[in-house]
Amino acid sequence: MKRWIAPALIVGAAALLGGACRDIVSPEPIPLVPRLCTLLEQCEGGDSWDCPNTVSDAFDDLPEDDRPAAYQEFLGADCLADCRNARSCRDKYPLCARNGGGCDEDADCCGFTSGIAECRGSSDGQCCAPDGAPCSTEVGCCEGDCQGGHCGDFACTLVGDPCDSHFECCTKRCDLAAEVPTCIPNTCSIIGEGCELASDCCEPAAVCELGVCSTKQCEGCDPFDPNNCCVVGGEGFCYLLLNEETACGPEDCPPEGVECGGDEDCACATADVRNLVCDDAAFPHCAQCRAAGATCNPALTEAEHGCCGSCDAATSTCSP
């Protein structure tokens, strides 16, 4: 399936489309066509195919007696609920071509969301089964012959079957976060593509903002990457903590947990921000106060020596 990165943010599609399928009772596909095409354009971010004419012609080409049942099947699929459902509906006959039928892109072929169909040929393409996909005398392979019920030297794992990695699935998508990981269909939106809900997005951490899948603000950062999430998020600087976690913060104002060699390393240049101290009780790190055993100067006042407790004059170390 061709993927088109959304060139514009379409606002209000959910309000326009939500629940439309449930309100349609006509046996003819006309009310569904413009709504489904609008949603597919929103989800895929571009007019990659002549959707209105293709959808209408697909139903028109069916025997007249078969049209009401076919249309009701699409209504039952709730095609307008979200992007995943819309793509699934595009993958239903007669909107897609069966094995051996003509095509321009993978999405034209029935089975493309399950990874078991592709469009091969630079012009006047033909739908076929890729390596690993099921095949038969009626379902031809893109390359070679059908052997043992599948194309090529291996059988890929079908949607809904258990998996251990993305690569074994026909769709190259395994829901590894599930209690029992299974292969999932290729109906989600990548970052930059359209969405109705966050669940439309392929990335578990993505959000649907203004109709487009986007990444959440980073919770970590890469101190060696000048384009790390701290810069993108406006926090300015990425700090590496002793526990190997990372934290965003203003430059020249280190957070707790940063390694230090002295109090000067924990000083904050930002006005009205209390300076941290270098706690060397175990592994030297910036902290709100020095723990018991840390070095301190007993000549300083209680407000100055920085101990969480008191500063022992005999040992020049902090006491509980």
Image: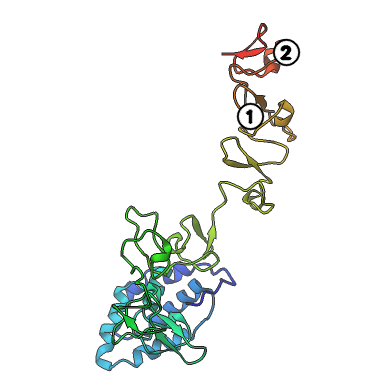
Q: State the residue in front, 178 or 21.
A: 178
Q: State the residue in front, 302 or 210.
A: 302
Q: Mark 2 points at which residue?
A: 300
Q: Is residue 313 above or below residue 241?
A: above
Residue 21 drawn at (x, y percent): 35, 74
Precedes in sequence: disc 1 or disc 2: 1
Q: Is residue 124 left or right of residue 57?
A: right
Residue 252 drawn at (x, y percent): 73, 38
**Disc 1 to disc 2, how far (Cα)?**
21 Å
**Residue mark closest to the camera, 1 vs 2:** 1
Q: State the residue in front, 14 or 8.
A: 8
Q: In this view, does 57 lie above or below 209?
A: below
Three-letter code for the amino acid on which mark 1 is drawn: His
Characterize the local packing of mark 1: few (<14), some (14-19) or many (20 or more) Cα atoms within 10 angstroms. Answer: many
Residue 80 seen in render: no
Badge number at residue 118: none
Residue 274 drawn at (x, y percent): 68, 28
Circle 1: element type: strand
